[in-house]
Amino acid sequence: MNIYDIDTDEHLVPFEPSRERVRIEVGATVRSDKQNYQIVQLLDLQNVVGIEVESGRSVSLRISELEPVEQERVDGLYVNYDISTISSDEWAIAQQRFSAIKPLLRDSVLPRNSVEERAKEVGVDAATLYRWLDRYQSWHEVLALVPRKRGWQSGNSRLSAQADDLIGAVIEEHYLTTQRRSIQSTIKEIETQAKALGLTPPSASAIRTRIKRIPEKVVLRRRGFADEARNRFTPSVGKFPGADYPLAVVQIDHTPIDLIIVDDRHRKPIGRLWLTLAIDVHSRMITGYYLALEDPSEISVGMCLAHSILPKESWLNLHNVRGEWPVWGFPRTVHTDNGPDFQAENFRRSCSNYNIENQFRPVKRPKYGGHIERLLGTFMRELHELPGTTHSSVPDRAGYDSDKHAALTMSEFEEWLVKTIIIYHNRVHSGIYMPPARKWHLGFFGSRGVDALVSVPPRPADPLTVQLDFMPSYRRTVQHYGVQLDVYYYSEALRHWIGTTDPATGQARKFVFRRDPRDISVIWFYDPVLKQYFRVPVANQAFPAATLWEFRAAKKQAVDEGRQHIDEALIGRLILERRQIVNDASASTKKARRDAQKHKVHTKNITPARPVKERVEAVPSLLTGEGQLLDDVDLIGDIQ
């Protein structure tokens, strides 16, 4: 069996990341059922009224079905890149530029003198600061501020400098005025002035693109809607410092739940689960969670935040819950403790690219995590009503056998958890004197005589891009056998990069790979030229789908047993043997049942970006029906 013959069409289908967002704002253009609409009214967090651009017909649109109008791709700009491909020096420059413009992003009104004053403070021209602002506000990524490639011209535009200046001047003096002239009128004015100057008139599409890139709050302010701009884009001051509006501060923390659960097969106790929970401090809404049998890690934090950011409609369907969980969007600040899982470099970089600030709780100052602590306490009290509870203290457990009374499986508990979250959102909260769902709604829509605090957050258009951003990343070289990351991986997508060197250093070139430790049968390769991801499977297709924890346990067993040649075939066989032992012992030992349940949970491969039910698939095996090792598998080499 040759490793170059194992590829399938599935692994050659590229995935192009996109961090586009669907703007849920009056005046925004969105796409639904292959038609473009302009939003004219926000009804609630489920529906808007849109006018079809071509026909002028008004229709009610479901927010969950809206898509962004595709942005024009700009070559040479570092947007939608994998964050780990950016060098530390380039990233430092991008962050420095973002720090320069960050104070200006908070204002709904941006007078020129404010920009000029800030430009003097940071030591750059006002035009440069405007250019950085334009780049960031067009793409909402700090990556857009990474220095462009050498030799690439500003804007990559076919317009001459004179034509470009003319467009800017007419937009400033003709379009952005209280006269509220139309875009078509602006195009005609530019054409007239261009001819008078002896210039070739810019195309209408180029002019429309420039107008579309102007931040909406600037358009509202300059065209005479100052009050609306202020109400929709300027947050009000609240009681909790920093948590003045929805998604201003999201707190995340882990806890073992006070409940013994049972396995799916024998319905016998297997211990407690770990819950990672995220809460919006302003409204007390739960924005996301992650439930696991393993101890908290970087993947726990990443999946919880991804779940927090992404819409929840499909997640409710997955768990058969009828209700509403209208929470999505990128938080301004993520507030956590100082654990290494929250300090991971990839997690912090990805947060920074989305303009999410990481704040860490002062050491030994638990009151700074009070909101999430109280929420977790509330959920633990709810749990104490369930069979199998461990209660919260030894006196409370006196005379109660948690293992004996345990009754819920992990999936049954998760369904209970989601339903409880919905109930909690609609129950009066003693700290805010109203249900969290009501507080959340008021933050975006206000009430009679009370202005809204902020606009409805844009929805991420591509869930998988968000999830990949928060998955652990690695840098590896590509060799003739593919790439090694614990095991060996190969795909035709890697062939072009075999043995390549970095032109800047002359050293072997390293590429970015991302992997979910819950399934090491595949990794994601980021092609630095195509700017696309490819799924790369294990080179030895007989290797079973396994978690990183299973792999490490099997490898440790091989080392402890003094095996001479520790390769993938051996480790794969040990993984399957260990699973068989676990299955045989699961009727009698809690640890075996827990391990068996872990395997079952991970084979479902349900993630925030892929909330679908389990599919029944054949699992590759290293063993034949007679228990013999397959003899047609080429071994690539020893495991390092």
Image (cartoon, rainbow, N blue to C red):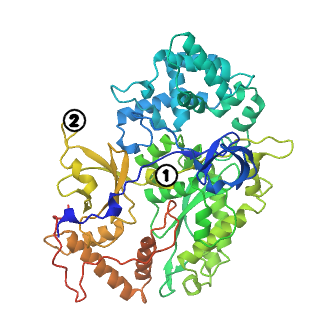
* Residue 235 in sight in this render: no
Q: Nearer the viewer, residue 236 or 394?
A: 236
Q: Residues within 10 Å of mark 2 (few under 14, many from 20)?
A: few
Q: Nearer the viewer, residue 539 or 567?
A: 539
Q: Give me the residue at 65% from left, 76% from top.
A: 396
In the drawing, what numbered circle is on residue 140? Answer: none
CB within 8 Å, label 2 to label 1: no
Q: Residue furthest right?
A: 449
Q: Give me the residue at 35% from left, 42% from top.
A: 85
Give the secondary structure at mark 2: loop
Vertical comparison of 100 with 74: above or below? above
The picture places residue 64, in percent across and down from the top left corner, at: 63, 56
The picture places residue 292, in percent across and down from the top left corner, at: 49, 68
Location of residue 629 by image quarter: bottom left
Q: Give me the residue at 48% from left, 28% from top.
A: 97
The picture places residue 407, in percent across and down from the top left corner, at: 58, 84
The answer to which of marks 2 and 1 sits earlier in the sequence is 1
Question: Quick check: 421 left or right of 581?
Answer: right
Vertical comparison of 269 with 508: above or below? below
Q: Give me the residue at 13% from left, 71% from top.
A: 564
* Residue 14 in sight in this render: yes
Query: What whole-number distance in Å separates the C-alpha atoms at marks 2 and 1?
Result: 31 Å
Question: Which amino acid does the dot numbered 1 rest on?
Answer: Val
Residue occupied by mark 2: 503
Residue occupied by mark 1: 466
Q: Residues within 10 Å of mark 1 (few under 14, many from 20)?
A: many
